[in-house]
Image (cartoon, rainbow, N blue to C red):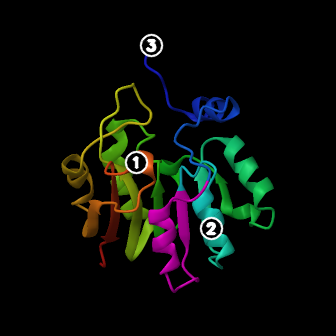
Amino acid sequence: MKQEFNADYWQNRYQLGQTGWDVGAITPPLREYFDQMPNTGQHILVPGCGNAYEAEYLFRKGFVHTYVADVAEAPLQRFSERVPDFPKDQLLLQDFFKLEGKFDLIVEQTFFCAIDPKLRADYARKCADLLVPGGKLVGLLFDTTFEHAGPPFGGSREEYRTYFEPYFEFLHFETAYNSIPPRQGRELFVELRGSRD
């Protein structure tokens, strides 16, 4: 029987501590990108947020319109305990593909690699739908294959281009120079701008 990567699956992974992708902090490529963002008034979404270190970092830097979404309740609860002043109505226990609203920035950090690969084209389209005209999708994608069955699921930059090209202008799509050591040379840093019309 095929494994379903649904809310119960992810809730169980978090409850059992089976979160090998979680490095316990924001990673350097995103931290450096956030540090040069001037507009704290942006509406930001971190989908499939997990423990949401990126959202915590942004919120502490004054990006108060940061929203996090996950299908599993456990990481959202932990995040809320860790960042008690984070607005509760910006914690979204929801399926990414059913989210509504408009955002200036979507942050990608180990969510794309967690969904079933057959949903990747839908992910790109949904990101485009959720962004305001000219909004950006920024984050990291694994540019590698994994020996074990996923998630996480790997892939290549050539494959990823096919998903994003219909909806985005590629501003940056290169190997990250400042990945954490275990991911060095195996991550793409992406900065994609959505349609302006």
Up-down relation of residue 106 to residue 61 (above or below):
above
What amino acid does circle 3 point to?
Met
**What segment carries the magenta color?**
25-46
Amino acid type of the residue tagged 2 in the rendering: Tyr
- Residue 182 visible in the displayed image: yes
Disc on the earlier residue, 2 or 1? 2
- Image point 43% across, 19% down: which residue? 2
Q: Whole-Å distance between the Cαs marked 3 and 1?
A: 32 Å
Which residue has dot 1 on it?
183
In the depicted view, which residue is nearer to us: 148 or 137? 148
**Front of the two marks 3 and 1:** 1
In this rendering, the label closer to the viewer, 2 or 1: 1
Q: Position of residue 110 (x, y in %)?
A: 47, 48
Quarter holding the N terminus is top left
Disc with the residue nearer the chain's start (2 vs 3): 3
From the image, tell me which residue sits under label 2.
57
